[in-house]
């Protein structure tokens, strides 16, 4: 009996473009590179498309496009940047998916919801748009329908899975602690539900949805994934391969998931350890190096799961990290000091509703929401006013990028970035005839927000948002 191994990389960077110029401003902390996007491309995205495997004498014996042998998802906003700035890397990412089709009969790329928003916290309309734009972007690049979709921060809820299933997505990937209960479904009579407890991650699970649809969930192997992300498993490619084989059982799947940036950015030369491990696994007769779509085609689920919801992979309190003072923090000394998270979400949601009312009013006879959902599928838009309205919608969807809530200090780059999207959306609102003054009330609603340097939202806007707006 073979052992199946699947390594998933979630590749994503917070958007860093100045919303007015479309260019990434200089980021001195990324020196000697102009900004973090360029630096991480040089350390991770590029090297993973041609990772060196060394001979005994230290010379390069071979180069491997690692992405063709793993499962991966790339943020659409990151791929858009790569396409413009590093087209060779972008094209090799697309090529990797084709190589996987040749090797396994199935592509190894998964789609991602478009703006990396926490889908369970989105309005139902935004949830649908994020999923549809993610699928449309995937089609444009990979020239096929995506089977799987990565949920940002693996944040899941029933309503999120319903939209995925409705839009034709067949599977997603979650953390093992997101499972609540499981039971076998291959017998005549359904078996009783049992607590997920020490979850068996070596098989796929079906999740039944209220609509009658179903979707498949894979749960990654927690300890082995942890080993890659935090315990130095990438110091030694041979040891990495051995650990993956040992973690499994004959006939079962071992799958791990981490940020893709582990391979080269978080761990220097991690892409070389990955390439070495992939070659080892490919040469191992009892091991099949696979990815989720290929595995699922041969192993339909014979178990069913119920999920803990809402839940995610990086907050132990459901999705509190992106909506409340839940206790999650990068710096433990700052735990329970994130009182700014709730008012930030509330203020942005208030602004969303005002901008949406304007959008609906000015779309004329057209159905505003199908217009927005299909924006990525239609050609260039001639009507300048309509284009501005859609750009306003894009900026206001960008306001909900999860990174704005993730870190401890609202004065950090990521939170300032989502305030910039809010300001950009407000510009477009005013340019398209929006007359009600919204900026002051928006800032009033952020009254309680203070950065670590005690800057208020008004001060952050005056110093770091207006400056970006002036270019
Ligand atoms: Zn939390």
Image: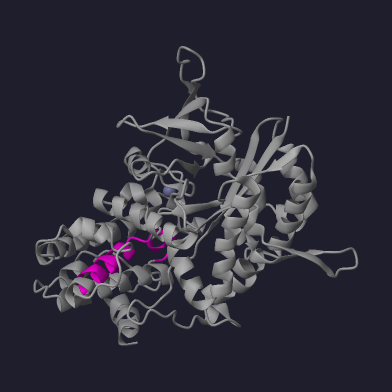
Q: Which residue occupies the extreme bottom position in the image?
A: 470
Q: Position of residue 391 (x, y in %)?
A: 26, 71
- In the rendered image, residue 404 lying in the magenta stretch gets the answer yes
- What residue lies at 16% left-to-right and 78% top-to-bottom? 431
How many marks the image carries: the answer is 0
Q: Examine the residues drawn in magenta and state their main secondary structure.
A: helix
Q: Quadrant of residue 56?
A: bottom right
Place of residue 185 in the rendered image (x, y in percent of width and height, measured from the top left): 49, 20
Give the residue at x 53% y 38%.
218
Residue at 34%, 68% in the rendered image: 418
User: What x and y, as percent, mark residue 27?
Assistant: 50, 80
Q: Residue furthest top?
A: 189
Image quadrant in which the N terminus is located: top right
Give above or below for 243 relative to 134: above
Magenta-colored stretch includes residue 254: no
The residue closer to the viewer here, 308 or 85, is: 85
Q: In the image shown, does 102 or 131 lie closer to the viewer?
A: 102
Coloration of the structure image = one colour
Specify whether 240 is left or right of 134.
right
Quadrant of the image for the C terminus? bottom left
For residue 429, side relative to residue 134 (left or right) = left
Tell me which segment is drawn in magenta: 388-409
Taking depth in this image into account, of 409 and 204 the one nearest to the observer is: 204
Q: Is residue 169 visible?
A: yes
Residue 139 in the image, given as x and y percentages of width and height: 43, 57
User: Is residue 328 in view from this perspective?
Assistant: no
């Amino acid at each position: 009996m073979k052992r199946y191994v699947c390594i998933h990389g979630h590749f994503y960077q917070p958007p860093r473009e100045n919303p007015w110029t479309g260019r990434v401003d200089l980021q001195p902390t990324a020196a000697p590179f102009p900004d973090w996007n360029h630096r991480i491309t040089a350390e991770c995205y590029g090297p993973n498309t041609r990772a060196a495997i060394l001979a005994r004498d230290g010379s390069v014996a071979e180069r491997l496009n690692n992405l063709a042998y793993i499962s991966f998802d790339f943020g659409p906003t990151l791929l858009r940047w790569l396409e413009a700035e590093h087209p060779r890397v972008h094209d090799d990412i697309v090529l990797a998916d084709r190589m996987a089709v040749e090797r396994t009969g199935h592509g190894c790329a998964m789609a991602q919801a478009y703006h990396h928003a926490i889908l369970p916290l989105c309005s139902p309309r935004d949830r649908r748009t994020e999923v549809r734009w993610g699928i449309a972007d995937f089609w444009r690049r990979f020239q096929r329908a995506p089977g799987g979709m990565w949920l940002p921060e693996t944040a899941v809820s029933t309503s999120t899975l319903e939209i995925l299933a409705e839009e034709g997505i067949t599977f997603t990937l979650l953390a093992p602690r997101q499972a609540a209960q499981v039971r076998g479904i291959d017998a005549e009579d359904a078996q009783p539900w049992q607590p997920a407890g020490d979850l068996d991650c070596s098989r796929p699970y079906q999740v039944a949805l209220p609509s009658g649809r179903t979707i498949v969930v894979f749960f990654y192997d927690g300890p082995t994934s942890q080993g890659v992300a935090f315990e130095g498993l990438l110091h030694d490619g041979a040891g990495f391969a051995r650990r993956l084989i040992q973690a499994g059982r004959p006939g079962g799947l071992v799958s791990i998931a981490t940020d893709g940036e582990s391979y080269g950015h978080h761990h220097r030369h991690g892409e070389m350890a990955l390439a070495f491990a992939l070659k080892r696994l490919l040469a191992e007769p009892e091991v099949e190096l696979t990815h989720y779509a290929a595995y699922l085609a041969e192993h339909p689920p014979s178990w069913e799961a119920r999920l803990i919801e809402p839940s995610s992979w990086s907050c132990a309190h459901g999705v509190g990290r992106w909506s409340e003072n839940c206790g999650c923090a990068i710096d433990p000394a700052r735990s329970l000091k994130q009182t700014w998270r709730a008012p930030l979400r509330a203020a942005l949601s208030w602004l969303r509703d005002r901008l949406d009312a304007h959008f609906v009013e000015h779309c004329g006879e057209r159905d505003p929401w199908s217009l927005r959902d299909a924006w990525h599928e239609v050609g260039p838009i001639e009507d300048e006013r309509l284009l501005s309205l859609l750009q306003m919608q894009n900026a206001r969807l960008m306001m909900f990028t999860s990174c704005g809530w993730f870190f401890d200090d609202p004065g950090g780059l990521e939170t300032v970035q989502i305030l910039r999207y809010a300001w950009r959306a407000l510009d477009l609102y005013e340019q398209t005839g929006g007359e009600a003054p919204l900026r002051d009330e928006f800032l009033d609603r952020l009254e309680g927000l203070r950065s670590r340097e005690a800057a208020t939202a008004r001060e952050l806007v005056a110093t770091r948002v207006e400056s970006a707006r002036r270019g």
